[in-house]
Amino acid sequence: MLGRLVLILLQLAIGWFGTPQVLRYVPVGGDAQVFVYAVAAAIIIWLVGVIGAQILKDVPMPSAGTLAAALIGGLIGAAIVAFKLNQMIPISAPPYLWPLGLAVLGYAIKK
């Protein structure tokens, strides 16, 4: 249980700081940028899960289904931001936290 908590915290931290660094090399702008961010964040989260499974105890290796769950969660978060649904939710959060958080949630639910 502690290993999974550490993995979630690592995924959030590395996803938050690493995804913008990766996206510097992807020239996409406009409304599509949040969807590309969601895909990149889901892949980074999955890769952190693969590495974390090698290092942390009691953390199973993620499958392709786990990647798909992270992608779906991230894309749902991107849709929330793109269609401005986050303004109707009383929780104030940075816009890019929605795709990242829901990608981690999708990863965690699938595991």
Image (spheres, rainbow, N blue to C red):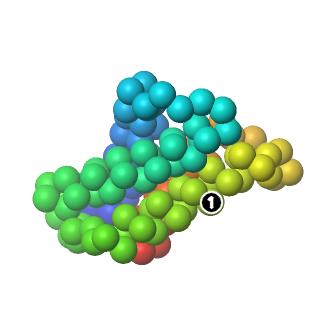
Q: Nearer the viewer, residue 46 or 31?
A: 31
Q: Is residue 81 above or below residue 49?
A: above
How far across and how far down the image is residue 30, in percent? 66, 32
Q: Give the number of marks.
A: 1
- Is residue 57 visible in the rendered image? The answer is yes
Q: Residue at x 14, y 55 (%)?
A: 55
Q: Residue at x 60, y 30 (%)?
A: 29
How far across and how far down the image is residue 56, in percent? 18, 58
Q: Is residue 13 above or below residue 2?
A: above
Q: Nearer the viewer, residue 2 or 68?
A: 68
Q: Looking at this rendering, what residue extends furthest in the right direction? A: 88
Q: Residue at x 54, y 62 (%)?
A: 73
Q: Nearer the viewer, residue 24 or 45?
A: 24
- Is 35 left, or right, of 87 in this rendering? left
Quadrant assignment for the N terminus: bottom left
Mark 1: secondary structure: helix
- Is 10 left, or right, of 41 in this rendering? left
How far across and how far down the image is residue 23, in percent? 43, 31
For disc 1, the neighbor class at 10 Å (few under 14, some 14 to 19, many from 20) is: some
Quadrant assignment for the C terminus: bottom left
Q: Which residue is tagged 1?
A: 76
Q: Residue at x 28, y 71 (%)?
A: 63
Amino acid type, label 1:
Ile
Q: Quadrant of residue 3?
A: bottom left
How far across and how far down the image is residue 19, in percent? 42, 36
Q: Looking at this rendering, what residue extends furthest in the left direction? A: 54
- Is residue 91 visible in the rendered image? The answer is no
- Is 39 left, or right, of 83 in this rendering? left
